[in-house]
Image (cartoon, rainbow, N blue to C red):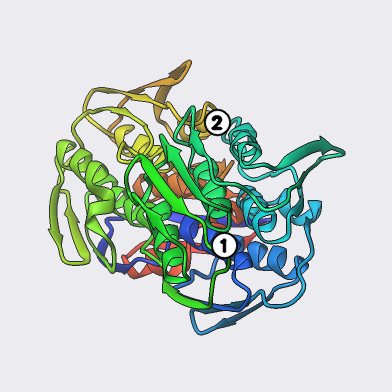
Amino acid sequence: MKVFVIQGPTRLEGEVRISGAKNSTLKLMAAALMVPGEVVLERVPQITDVELMADVLRRLGATVQRENGRLVIDSSGELCEEAPYELVTKMRASIQVLGPLLARLGHARVAMPGGDAIGSRPIDIHLRGLERMGAKFTTEHGYVEGLCDRLQGVNTLLEFPSVGATENILMAAVLAEGRSVIENAAREPEIQDLCAFLNNAGARIGGVGTPTITVDGVDQLHSAEHSIDPDRIEAGTYAIAAVATQGDVTLVDCEPSHLELPLMKLEDAGAEVTRGEGRVRVRMDRRPTTLDLVTLPFPGFPTDLQPPMMVLLSQARGSSILTENVFESRFLFVDELNRMGAHIRVEGHHAVIRGVEQLSGAPVRSPDIRAGAALVVGGLCADGRTEVYDAGHIERGYEQFVDKLTGLGAEISLESA
C-alpha cells in the first residue's frame, strides 16, 4: 500500500503547470476505436487510469504506444468485441467503449463498470439511448452484451444530463445512419473536447457546448491528431489548495473559462483571483469566509471539486452548508476529515461545516481520487504529520502530484506502508 506523508502546515506558493484532462483523455482513447487508422493524442497525462484504458484498448485489438507525452493508437487491425472484467471493473470510464464498439463492429460485450465508490452511477441511460438507435442488449454474468446492424440516427431526450451517457450515445451516433439529436445533453468541457476530436477525424457534430447536440452520421472516420484540453479538476484542486493554505499560486496552461464558477466561489471566500490568457493566479492571506455551495452539472459547481472545497470551508470563520446533488456517496470521506479536527455534520445530501482555526495532522484513508486529493490538501493545512493511505487512488487522476506540490513548497513524500 502507498501512503502520502505530509508535514504541515504549508503555505503553497509558486507556479504549477496543468496537465491534459484525465476525463477527456479516457473518452478520446475510447473514441479512437472508431478510427480505422492512427490517432495521435498530445498532452496525455501519465496517470494510472490512462494506463488501464490503454490495457483495455490493447485487449480489444488496438495498438497503443506512449511517446514523450503523446499517445499513438492504431485501431486499423481486427478488433475484438469483449472488454474483460479484470480491467473494466477497475475503472468506470471503460464503459465508454460500448458505443464505439457497437458503431464499428455491431457487437460489444463489456463487463459492468467499477471505479470509485462515490455512489450509484447506473448505465441505464446509456443503454436506453443506444436501444433507441437499434441496439439490443442482454445483461447477465456481470456483462452487458449489445448487438445491432448499422445504428440509426434518432432523437434522444436524456432524463438527466449524464456525461457518460452523452458521450456513449454521441460516439455511436457518429457512425449511425442519418441524423441524431441529443436533447438535455451534458455540456462539460470534456464533451466539447471529444466533439472537437471527432470532427477533426471526419465526424459532423453541431451544437457543441449546448444542451442540444446534432450528429449527422458518416460512413467512416479517418486518422487524426488532437491536443487534449487542460484538466479543469486538477487546476481547481490547486486553486482551492492555494486558498486553503493562504498561499499564492499561479496555474499555467489552464483554461480559466472552464473554472468560472469555482473561481467566483473562491473570490466569495475572500481570495484574490487574477485571470489571464491560459493562466490564473490565486492569492489568499486570511481564513476563508463561509459559503453555501451546491454541486450541479456544468456550468454548475463540479462535484469533483466538492471534497477540496469542504477542506477549505472546514477552516472558514463560521458555518457553511455544502449540498451534493450529483453523487450521493461523495460524503464518505467526511469521517476522515473529522479525524483531522474538522467539525462536519452530514444530513442527507447536505453537509453542515463549522469552521475551525486549524486542522490537526492524523492518519487517514483515501476512499477515491478526489477525496484523496482533498485529504492531502487537508494535510497541507494541518499542524503536524498527516498520512493519507490508499494513495493509489490519487495517482489515478493526478499527474506528478508529489513533484508539483513539492514545487509549490509542500513537504510531501510518497512512501510504502
Who comes first in sequence, dot 2 or dot 1? 1
Tag 2 residue: 332
Q: Amino acid at mark 1?
A: Ala
The image shows residue 339 at horizontal and vertical percentages of 50, 32
Up-down relation of residue 406 to residue 119 (above or below): below
Which residue does the numbered mark 1 point to in the structure image?
Answer: 31
- Secondary structure, mark 1, is helix
Query: Left or right: where does residue 339 sit relative to residue 19?
Result: right
- Which quarter of the figure is the N terminus placed in? bottom right
Nearer mark to the viewer, of 2 and 1 = 1
Question: How many angstroms separate mark 2 from mark 1 (CA)?
Answer: 32 Å
Give the residue displayed 48% in from the left and 43% down from the top.
163
Image position of 116 with respect to 291: above or below = below
Q: Image quarter for residue 100?
A: bottom right
Mark 2 Cα shell of 10 Å, populated few (<14), some (14-19), many (≥20): some
SS category of the residue bearing label 2 = helix
Q: Position of residue 226 (x, y in %)?
A: 43, 73
Along the line of sight, which residue is nearer the eye, 385 or 365? 365
Q: Which residue occupies 57% across, 53% down?
A: 177
